[in-house]
Image (cartoon, helix red, strand yellow):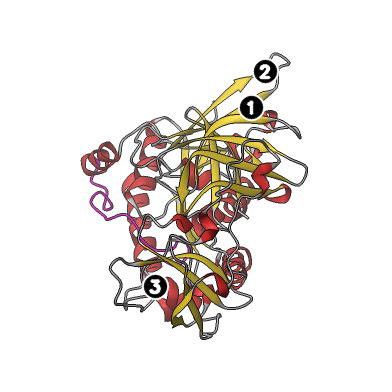
Amino acid sequence: MKKQRVIVGLSGGVDSSVAAYLLKEQGFEVIGLFMKNWHDESVTISNECPWLEDSNDAMLVAEKLGIPFQTVDLSKEYKERIVDYMFDEYANGRTPNPDVLCNREIKFDVFLSIALSLGADFVATGHYCQKSSIQTAEGTTYFQLLAGADANKDQSYFLCQLTQAQLAKVLFPIGQLKKVEVREIALQQGLVTAEKKDSQGLCFIGKVRLPDFLQQQLQPKTGAIIEIHADSPLYETLPTAEDALEIQAYKKQYTPENGVEVGSHNGAHFFTIGQRKGLGVGGKEEPLFVIATDVETNTLYVGKGKAHPGLYRNTLKVTNDDVHWVREDLRLPKGTSMHVSARIRYRQPLQNATLFKEDEALYIQFTSPQSAITSGQFVAWYLGDELIGSGVIT
């Protein structure tokens, strides 16, 4: 019987290395494919060449495992689908998540297409998440995206934009393991990546300073920093969202008249909600945090201390065009609601929340107010350990 072919995205890290090893042990025909994503070395933070180092490590792993290996250059697709999108989002005062985009646009779209063209039955990655499936009474199969067994490493959030068609073709070989077990397997098998540190850079660039990267395209522009005091009348009536219609008052709007100017900045598009570093305003008993940005007027609004009410909201909005259901069968009809758990960033503990579907958008109301809800980031919602949907925060 012919073996099923799996093409593994070998990144040069320990997780994908062990994923390839496990698949070979399970009897698959395994091929390693390294994705080269970026050429511009002008924004890296050292003279190292991270993609070349990673490619060499991936090749050594493939040699050790006795599997075919090749490199594919996807830098053109990265530029068009992710880098340009990121610049547009920052220019519009939003903060995109390149890792989620990387998975949606590259690893499980472009890479998947290449793999299928090479005769693959599946693609596999070193993500810490799991996959299962259920069948309805009518006989329809739905694939489930489940949290990884290692709660500290669960990466289901990064895969929150995957579709049923993509899930049908993907395997997550290390999803049932803890990180320490993955490293142990790598050491036992003598893989060169066994003790290699996890990558900390942007998914498509590597070791890079984000501000340096942004300043390649976004020009500095001096503007005012306005401090909004915690006892401002703006906070006297926080939205309670007792019913779905009241939820629409989900976000505070500030004007310079609401506060006092305390400094200047070099471009509102360089800052994000919750940011503390880089403001350059001293002499305060507590640090200042960005609570809002306005790229049209080039104004930053800040508040003093982590407990400042401007940092917290209990409701966020996702427009219809930006709502994505991994489980299409669970899509909410207009005028209905659903109790879920949700997170607005990677590694955030899941929070109790309720989804409300209205005409123009989906609203998510949290039981407890959330800090630094940020436009452009992704919110993902779960039923138990299963990620069922996600969306871009307005």
Mark 1 belongs to which amino acid? Tyr
* Location of mark 1 (residue): 142
Q: Give the Cα distance between marks 1 and 2.
A: 8 Å
199 within the magenta span:
yes
Quarter the C terminus occupies: bottom right
Q: Is mark 1 on a helix, strand or loop?
A: strand
Q: Residue 125, relative to residue 98: is it above or below?
A: above
Residue 353 relative to residue 302: left or right: right
Q: State the extent of the magenta-drawn residues as a range.
A: 189-206
Q: Is mark 2 on a helix, strand or loop?
A: loop
Q: Residue 204, relative to residue 338: is it above or below?
A: below
196 within the magenta span:
yes
Q: Check if mark 1's residue and mark 2's residue have beta carbons within 8 Å.
A: yes
Q: Earlier in the sequence, mark 1 or mark 2?
A: 2
Residue sitting farthest toward the top: 137
Asked if one can make out residue 387 in the rendered structure from this viewpoint, the answer is: yes
Task: List x then y, in percent, for residue 300.
Answer: 51, 73
* Location of mark 2 (residue): 136
Q: Earlier in the sequence, mark 3 or mark 2?
A: 2
Q: Give the Cα distance between marks 3 and 1.
A: 40 Å
In front: 288, or 354? 288
* Location of mark 3 (residue): 209
